[in-house]
Structures are given as structure tokens and as C-alpha cells.
Image (tube, grey):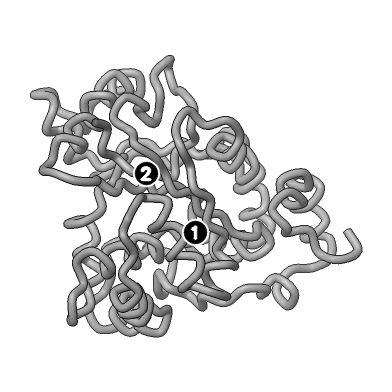
């Protein structure tokens, strides 16, 4: 039976928070899980380690088409790692590249898709990638958006904010449960409880409350300050920046808000992100 549950999102939309909540729910016990233990419980779908496990070639020297030929094998390798569900992080579009699916359906059981108001997402994107707000708006509206391969990751192809969301939420080939960042922020018990029920988990309320406490933004920020976090960008002072919603109201100009809405209006309206008056 397919065992991968993708934890998918556009960058800087709450993916790591959901991963940590799952980590603490399933593995936490009385002691909260360390940030840098995430890869022990949730795999990286674009991590070169999985690609290196299925080829004798030098992955660092392979072209994108060659990498894509290996992708189904890399994902099958992740799916084969032990028993039970495999939670796998991705920012990739649910589409193809060089004729090969970026997300391998044959080994996929289901997915969580986390989305966040683009008016707030753009602020975090700017900080994470070292961009101005205007540059971040162009970045999020870029239908060819991707990150270049580096020493640990193959190329991630996420397209624009709207395209990424549409690919995962409009007629996906497997069950997808949508988690709005804002709902998780406002009511983590209900939002995460429903997500776990979607997985077919016999929900333990005590374990859920403990995981929520252990994964609070204050807790995650304190852990990063104490131990560091491998996923922090070189452009940012910290990976966990503020964790608040609605910051766009004091950070963006009306012209910047208009630029984001004009490109993303249909999906913003569908998911309840259009501000009053727009």
C-alpha cells in the first residue's frame, strides 16, 4: 500500500510548523522533539540523500532531466523505509518536469497542503530569500519559480503562489487535506485534530495538546535560538520570524497589496484571503 503522506506548501507557509506538530504528536512523549530531528521523522522529497541511495552516479553532476528520471526511484526508496506512514516535505508543484511527475503518485497515500495568505507570505519570503518586498512580490508571481540545486537538495519547482496552490487543490490524483495557516494559528486543536482524523488516526486529545504546547511558536523560536536550525536561510537572522497573521497591514503599501491581489484574486477569494473592500 502506498505510504507517503506529502506535507506540501508554497515556501514560507507553515510547512515546518506542521512537520513539528506531527513530530511531537507521534514521537514527542514528555520531551519535545528537537528542531534538527525533523529529518528523522519527516523526509525531504528533494533531498539528495534519497537520490544518492538509488544511483551510483554523482548526483551533484546530473542535469535536471537526469535527476527527474531518478525521482520515482528516490520517492520509492523513501516509501520503503520501515513500516507505517512516511511524512515527506515538499514545495514542488503537483505537476511534471521533463515529462516526469515531481510527486510520484504510485507511492503516495495522501497529502496535507498548507496555505497562507499571500499578503503575509510575501513578507516571510522576502526575509528568507534576502529580497526586497517588491522583489518578493515578483518572486511569488513568477510562474517559473524554482530554487537552484545545492549541496543537499535537487531543484525544487514551485511556480507561483497561485499555481502551486491550484495544482494541489484542484482535482489532485490522491486525497489532499488543506490546512490554512491562519486556522492553525487561531485554533490549533481543531485544525490539527481534523488533519489527524483525515489520516485515520485514533485521536488522543492529551497527546495532541502536548504536541501543540511543544510546537508553539514561542517554543520553536527558543529552540532555534538555543540549538540553531539547519533550514535557516543565510539571509535571515532566524527561521522563525514572528509567526503572526495580518502583518501585511503595516508592512505593505496599497500599491503592493494591489499587485498581489491582481495576480492572485481568484484563489485568494476562494480561500478567504481577499481583504474587505477588494
Which residue is labeled 1 in the image? 12
Rendering quarter of residue 212: bottom left
Q: Quadrant of the N terminus?
A: top left
Q: At 58% from the left edge and 30% from the top edge, which residue is drawn?
A: 171
Query: Can residue 144 be seen?
Result: yes
Which residue is labeled 2 in the image? 6
Rendering quarter of residue 148: top left
Q: At 34% from the left edge and 64% from the top edge, which residue is drawn?
A: 203
Left/right of residue 82 with respect to residue 25 in the rendered view:
left
Query: Can residue 224 be seen?
Result: no
Image coords of residue 151 (percent x, y): 24, 44
Q: Quadrant of the C terminus?
A: bottom right
Q: At 66% from the left edge and 47% from the top edge, which residue is drawn?
A: 138
Front-lying residue, 139 or 211:
211
Front-lying residue, 114 or 173:
173
Image coords of residue 129 (percent x, y): 49, 57
Q: Residues within 10 Å of mark 2 (few under 14, many from 20)?
A: many
- Secondary structure under tag 2 reads strand
Q: Residues within 10 Å of mark 1 (few under 14, many from 20)?
A: many
Q: Earlier in the sequence, mark 2 or mark 1?
A: 2
Front-lying residue, 4 or 189:
189
Callout 2–callout 1 Cβ contact below 8 Å = no
Residue extending farthest to the right is 277
Residue extending farthest to the top is 99
Image coords of residue 107 (percent x, y): 28, 30
Amino acid at each position: 500500500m502506498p505510504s507517503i503522506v506529502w506535507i506540501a506548501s508554497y515556501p514560507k507557509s507553515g510547512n515546518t510548523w506542521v512537520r513539528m506538530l506531527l513530530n511531537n504528536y507521534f514521537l514527542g512523549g514528555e520531551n519535545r522533539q528537537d528542531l534538527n530531528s525533523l529529518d528523522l521523522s519527516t523526509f525531504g522529497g528533494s533531498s539528495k540523500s534519497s537520490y544518492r541511495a538509488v544511483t551510483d552516479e554523482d548526483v551533484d553532476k546530473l542535469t535536471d532531466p537526469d535527476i527527474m528520471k531518478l525521482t520515482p526511484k528516490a520517492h520509492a526508496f523513501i516509501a520503503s523505509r520501515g513500516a507505517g506512514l512516511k511524512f515527506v516535505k515538499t514545495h514542488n508543484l503537483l505537476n511534471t518536469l521533463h515529462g516526469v511527475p515531481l510527486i510520484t503518485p504510485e507511492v503516495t497515500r495522501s497529502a496535507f497542503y498548507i496555505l497562507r495568505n499571500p499578503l503575509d507570505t510575501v513578507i516571510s519570503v522576502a526575509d528568507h530569500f534576502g529580497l526586497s518586498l517588491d522583489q518578493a512580490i515578483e518572486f511569488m508571481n513568477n510562474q517559473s519559480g524554482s530554487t537552484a540545486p545545492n549541496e543537499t537538495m535537487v531543484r525544487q519547482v514551485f511556480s507561483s503562489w497561485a499555481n502551486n496552490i491550484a495544482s494541489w487543490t484542484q482535482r489532485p490524483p490522491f486525497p489532499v487535506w488543506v490546512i490554512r495557516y491562519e486556522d492553525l494559528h487561531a485554533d490549533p486543536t481543531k485544525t490539527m485534530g481534523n488533519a489527524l482524523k483525515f489520516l485515520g488516526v485514533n485521536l488522543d486529545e492529551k497527546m495532541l495538546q502536548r504536541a501543540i504546547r511543544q510546537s508553539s511558536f514561542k517554543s520553536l523560536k527558543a529552540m532555534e535560538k538555543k540549538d540553531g536550525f539547519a533550514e535557516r536561510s543565510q539571509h535571515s537572522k532566524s527561521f522563525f520570524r514572528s509567526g503572526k497573521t495580518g502583518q501585511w497591514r503595516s508592512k505593505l503599501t496599497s500599491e503592493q497589496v494591489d499587485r498581489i491581489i491582481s495576480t492572485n484574486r481568484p484563489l485568494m477569494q476562494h480561500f478567504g484571503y481577499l481583504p474587505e473592500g477588494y
